[in-house]
Image (cartoon, rainbow, N blue to C red):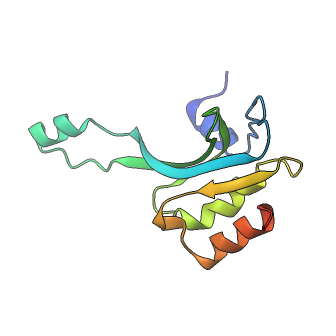
Amino acid sequence: MPDFSTLCRRQKTLTVNIPCRGSVGPLHLLVDSTGIKVEGEGEWNARKHGGTKRRVWRKIHIGIDERTLEIRSAEFTASDVGDAPMLPELLDQIPLDQEIGSVTADGAYDTRKCHDAIAARVPQP
């Protein structure tokens, strides 16, 4: 049985395929991110007892199908990684034969790099 450190090291190289039913017609992708606390004492306990332990957060960036609400792409990063640099990687996880009709995201993705990545995948009218 591998120890905790070995499991943590190996998880970084794991490739996870997300099964999905696929979209009927073009995919309308909704993209955002959120923080996930992965280690550390509870916030209430820290306030109550004045804990100074460093809390560890990770960020999950996801793209979901607007119609089915299925997760179509996902990336975990450190908490200091911005949203915009991750959009091209999220789009790369969508199979090339899947037509993307639109990408909806908040203002954090309003960058030239994101616009270019979307334009490369979404057919222009």
Q: Tell me, yes or no, if residue 76 can be seen here.
A: no
Where does the image place residue 91, in percent across and percent down from the top left?
72, 56
- 47 up-or-down from 108: above or below: above
Give the residue displayed 54% in from the left and 71% down from the top. Answer: 110
Quadrant of the rendered image containing residue 119: bottom right
Is residue 16 toward the left or the right of residue 55 in the image?
right
Where does the image place residue 115, in percent across and percent down from the top left?
65, 72
Give the residue displayed 73% in from the left and 34% down from the top. Answer: 18
Q: Tell me, yes or no, if residue 83 can be seen here.
A: yes
Where does the image place residue 61, in percent across and percent down from the top left?
56, 50
Residue at the far bottom in the pictured view = 112
Nearest the camera: 43 or 117? 117
- 105 up-or-down from 34: above or below: below
- 91 up-or-down from 108: above or below: above
Nearest the camera: 36 or 103? 103
Is residue 102 toward the left or the right of residue 17 in the image?
left
Is residue 113 toward the left or the right of residue 95 in the image?
left
Residue at the far top in the pictured view = 1
Quadrant of the rendered image containing residue 47: top left
